[in-house]
Amino acid sequence: MKKSTIYTILAEDDKDDAFLFNEVIDELSVPIDLKIVTDGEELMQQLTVESSRLPEVIFLDINMPRKNGMECLSEIKENDRLNEIPIIIFSTSFDEEIVNQLYINGADYYIQKPSGFSALKDVIGKALDLIARKGELQPGRKDFVLSEKKTRAV
């Protein structure tokens, strides 16, 4: 049985992080159609063009130029056409207060970018697996943060 392709947008201003994300996607067994945008303005322009194909998931960096991830998340969740798109926050920083606010504002998961390729592959693979299940979005607060530790079997 052929797996369907997951149309994914990565909103990421760091070229190295975007390259690494793309490398991880290439190694996963999940078929992905990846579009990369480099700032929040570009993301919102892409999403609000009526004729544009909507992604099945957005990986959203918090710290971006022109419009940050928090602003994009709010705009997406307030838009009836966009508010069902799963949003996975993908950021190097981890501030508990910001993470809590992102959860309250409707993000589906939060990934603090791991430093190693293998860990990054594990956590992105886990996130995509959760998205594919669709019924498991907006987890309880304790399961909101995906990390390398949570992707490995105990």
Image (cartoon, rainbow, N blue to C red):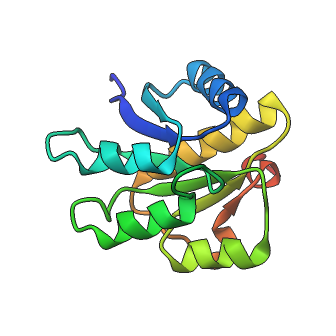
Tell me: residue 128, above or below residue 18: below
The N terminus - image quarter = top left
Residue found at x 32% / y 65%? 83
Image location of residue 144, percent across then percent down:
63, 67
Does residue 71 appear in the picture of this structure?
Answer: yes
Does residue 137 appear in the picture of this structure?
Answer: no
Q: Nearer the viewer, residue 139 or 53?
A: 53
Left or right: where 131 falls relative to 88: left
Tell me: residue 5, above or below residue 153: above
Image location of residue 145, percent across then percent down:
69, 63
**For residue 103, which quarter of the picture?**
bottom right
Q: Residue furthest left?
A: 51
Tell me: residue 52, above or below residue 141: above
Image location of residue 18, percent across then percent down:
63, 30
Q: Nearer the viewer, residue 122 or 2?
A: 122
Residue found at x 42% / y 37%? 8
Q: Nearer the viewer, residue 5 or 107?
A: 107
Residue found at x 76% / y 55%? 150
Image location of residue 92, percent across then percent down:
77, 50
Left or right: where 17 falls relative to 65: right
Residue found at x 59% / y 40%? 12
Left or right: where 78 falls relative to 142: left
Q: How many marks?
A: 0
